[in-house]
Each structure stands twice: as C-alpha cells, then as structure tokens.
Image: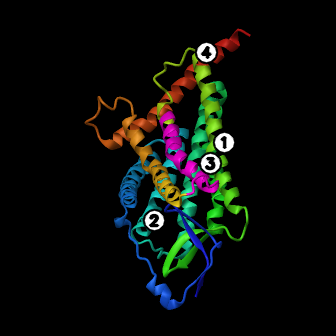
Amino acid sequence: MDSNFNIIFDANYDYSYDNSTNTSLTVGEEVFFKVQTTCFTQVICLLVLVVNVIIFLLGIGGNGVVIWIAGFRMKKSVNTTWYLSLAVSDFIFCSCLPFNIAYSVTSDWIFGLFMCKFTSFVMFLNMFSSIFLLVIISVDRCIAVMFPVWAQNHRTVGKAAFIIVLAWFVSAALSIPSIVYRDVQHHLGISHCMNNYTSSQYAHEIIAMSRFVFGFVIPFLLIIVCYTVIILRLKASQMAKSGKPFKIMTALIVTFFLCWAPYHAFVLVELFKSFQSTDIIANGLRIGTTVAAANSFLNPVLYVFMGSDFRKKFKSSILSKIENAIGEEGRTMSRYLSRSSSVDAKASTHI
C-alpha cells in the first residue's frame, strides 16, 4: 500500500498536505505503525477541546434565543432583520462544532467526505456572511446619518432582506473552495479531513489570500470609512452625545476583528513559511481557529450586557435584556432619523 503525503496540521477545520515525500508501507506495517493519539494527552488540545464545547453550548443557546426574540417576539424592522441574519449565521456554525469536537477527541474523521466538505464550507460561510453583514450595517448607519430623509423614506424590511440574501449568496460563492479542495485521506489507518491542493499549484496561496483580502482587509477598510464619516457627521451636527447610538454595533465589529485576526495571521504565517517549526504553526492555527469560533457565541453576550440600563435592571430576565438591546438600536436610529429629517426640512424652507 502506497501512502505518499506529508500531513501538515491546520486547525480543526483545515488540513493541507503535499506529496513531497514518498513512503511505502505494507498492510502489516500500516497496522504496526498506526498511531492512535488522543486529544487528552496534549495540554493545548485539551484546553481547545474544552473551549469548543463551551462555545457550542453557549452558541447554540444564545443564538437560538436571539433568533426566537428577533424572529418571533419583536416587530419586524430593518435592525432586527440584520441581527436575525447574524444570529442565524452563528447558529449554523455552532451546530457543526460537534463534528470537529469529535474529530479532536479521536484524531480520526469518521463522518465521511460530505461532512468533511460541509463543515469547512460552513465555517467560511459564517466568516464571510458575518463580516459582510457588519459591513452592510455600517453602510446602513452611514447612509442614515448622511441622508436621513432618504433613509427614512427608503429603509424597508423588504430591501434589507434582499440585501441579506445577496450577501449570503456572495458568501456561499467565496466558500466554494472548501467544497472543491476539501478531501478525506487515509494515512496509517487513520482518516484525515484536510485540504488537497495538489491538483493546482497556486490554489493554496490564492485561496488563503482571497479569504484574507475579502474576509478581513476590505471589510475592515469599509467599516473604518463608514465610522469615520459617521463620527464627523455627528460632531458637525452636535449630535455626538445622543445616547451612544452605535455602541452595540461597535462592540460587534471590534469583537469580530479581534476574534478573526489571530486566525488570519497564522494562516499567512503558514502560507509564507515564516516559522520552520510546524508545531508553532499547528498550535497557532488550532488556537486561532478556536478564538475565531468564539465570535459566534459572543454576539448574544454583547446583546445582554450592552442593553440599556443593564445594571439597573439586573434582576429582569435575560430575554428582556436581549430584546431591549436589539430594540435599542432601532429606537435610537428612529429618533435620529426623525430629528435629522425635521432639521433638514426646516433648512429647506429657507432656500
């Protein structure tokens, strides 16, 4: 039996390999050299495993509650539509975590080729859809501040839903490489879910850079531009002290970039071989991917702890806090649009 690949660990969700080494094993030798490593014998792996279990439990519960509140308990609005889509994206991602948790425990992928491709696809679908939604919300805020009259007349739930569908479609398209290049390989009697880039010479570099550029750099620049415009506009109109209108949105954006920055950093390190030690890259990607996954359960936590008057209403229910936090964004935006519209209307009478 011939097995001609060198495995390089790339977090729970990404394995890659190249066929630069040749190893020939008979069936008997394969059984003899079969390595049954477990996550419980490695400190970092064990810590990552525990964190992933916590992320799964809190992510499913927290995002499930947000979906219930934003989707069924609250009145349909543009703002609830944004946050509902964000919660759905995080919920789907957290739903796939048990497969990767089991993979970490057993070091053996037993779920077949379809789930190997699907779990990786879902991870990047979550990454792209989340950041695209944050960009959309930032642009929405910017337009509302710059053109309040137009925004008040044209911001509708139907248009928001269409934009979200478009964002999900683009996110799915950018996540297709996970389906194309993800593969299950068998080595020393163990199945590995990994990336197989051997069919294309520069596929690894192109895909890694495209994820970094379209899933991190460009969205970051767009959000910075939007927030710069918003801040300047609010200061110019002397409305900067209007009750911290964008605090939840700001927290969501900062949290996303802090969670995903380590992952992208170690992907680039692995890509350009900045470290010769594969252990550093392996552990870095393992930790970076786990920190990125944490973003999926932190959003509901932010809704709770950044709702209005959290300390004063500490004894009230968690559901009320989440509903308050999501609704606060809409109420603040409505007040701002109303005030700005009346100011613009008065200004127009002098022309």
Q: What residue sits right under mark 4 in the picture?
A: 236
Disc 3 from disc 1: Cα separation: 7 Å
Q: Residues within 10 Å of mark 4 (few under 14, many from 20)?
A: few
Q: Position of residue 200 (x, y in %)?
A: 73, 67
**Magenta segment, which residues?**
250-276
Mark 4 or mark 2: whose residue is earlier in sequence: 2
Disc 4 from disc 2: Cα separation: 50 Å
Q: Main secondary structure of the magenta part?
A: helix
Q: Nearer the viewer, mark 4 or mark 2?
A: 2
Q: Residues within 10 Å of mark 1 (few under 14, many from 20)?
A: few
- Relative to 79, does residue 275 appear above or below in the rendering? below
Identify the amino acid type marked 4: Ala
Q: Quadrant of the C terminus?
A: top right
Q: What residue sits right under mark 1 in the picture?
A: 218
Identify the amino acid type marked 3: Gly
Q: Position of residue 289 (x, y in %)?
A: 49, 54
Disc 1 from disc 2: Cα separation: 29 Å
Identify the amino acid type marked 2: Asn
Helix, strand or loop at label 2? It is helix
Residue 168 disc label: none
Q: Nearer the viewer, mark 4 or mark 1?
A: 1
Residue 100 disc label: 2
Q: Nearer the viewer, mark 4 or mark 3?
A: 3
Please indicate, yes or no, whether residue 1 appears anywhere in the rendered image: yes
The reply to whether dot 3 and dot 1 touch (C-beta < 8 Å) is: no
Mark 4 or mark 1: whose residue is earlier in sequence: 1
The reply to whether dot 1 and dot 2 touch (C-beta < 8 Å) is: no
Q: Nearer the viewer, residue 208 or 343?
A: 208
